Amino acid sequence: MTKIEHVKVIDLPKITDKRGDLTFLQKNVGLPFELQRIFWTYDLKTHSKRGGHAYKAQNEVICVVSGSADLIVTNKDNAKEKITLNRADKGVFIPPNVWRHLENFATNTILLHISDSEYDEDDYIRDINKYLL
């Protein structure tokens, strides 16, 4: 559980044997919503920031496939929480109307973004000042 209401760290399904670990997603397993879109971010510059938006209606889970990054979530009261993503069998569920950005990327980090909606630019809130109103 996190300090920001409804944002939560979730366990993703994991299978382990002597060869290593396997984490997977499939319909009705591992996600708190039905998957509609997946995208990934990679070749991330260590001191850059990604995200910097909230969604009006979209739910999202962000997880790290490789490397690590810090996810900063901010609610409408401007309360912030940092969640370090560094395990491939964990994800962070972010509901609508929660601002998020990612920073502090380790070399070769790959982040997987899983959504319950197709891309819709009108669903984005990209101005933090408008978000905090």
Image: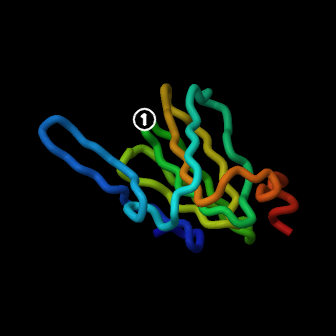
Amino acid at dot 1: Ser
From the top left corner, tell me how far across and down residue 52 is, in percent.
73, 48
| Residue identifier under label 1 | 66
Q: Is residue 6 above or below residue 130?
A: below
Q: Residue at x 33, y 47 (%)?
A: 23
Q: Secondary structure at mark 1?
A: strand
Q: Is residue 14 left or right of residue 84?
A: left
Instruction: State which quarter of the image contains the C terminus.
Output: bottom right
Name the residue: 51% across, 63% down: 34
Q: Position of residue 22 (x, y in %)?
A: 28, 43
Residue 101 image position (x, y, % from top left) = 66, 48
Residue 47, image quadrant: top right
Residue 79: percent from the left, percent from the top?
67, 66
Residue at (55% x, 66% y) in the render: 7
Q: How is the image coloured?
A: rainbow
Quadrant of res 117? bottom right
Q: Residue furthest bottom?
A: 5
- The foreground one among 92 and 75 is 92
Q: Residue at the spot x=75%, y=53% of the render?
A: 120
Q: Badge 1, how many Cα within 10 Å: few under 14, some, many 20+?
A: some
User: How many callouts does the rendering have?
Assistant: 1
Compared with 26, 56 (above or below) is: below
Tell whether 5 sits left or right of 133: left
Left or right: where does residue 16 sit relative to residue 112? left
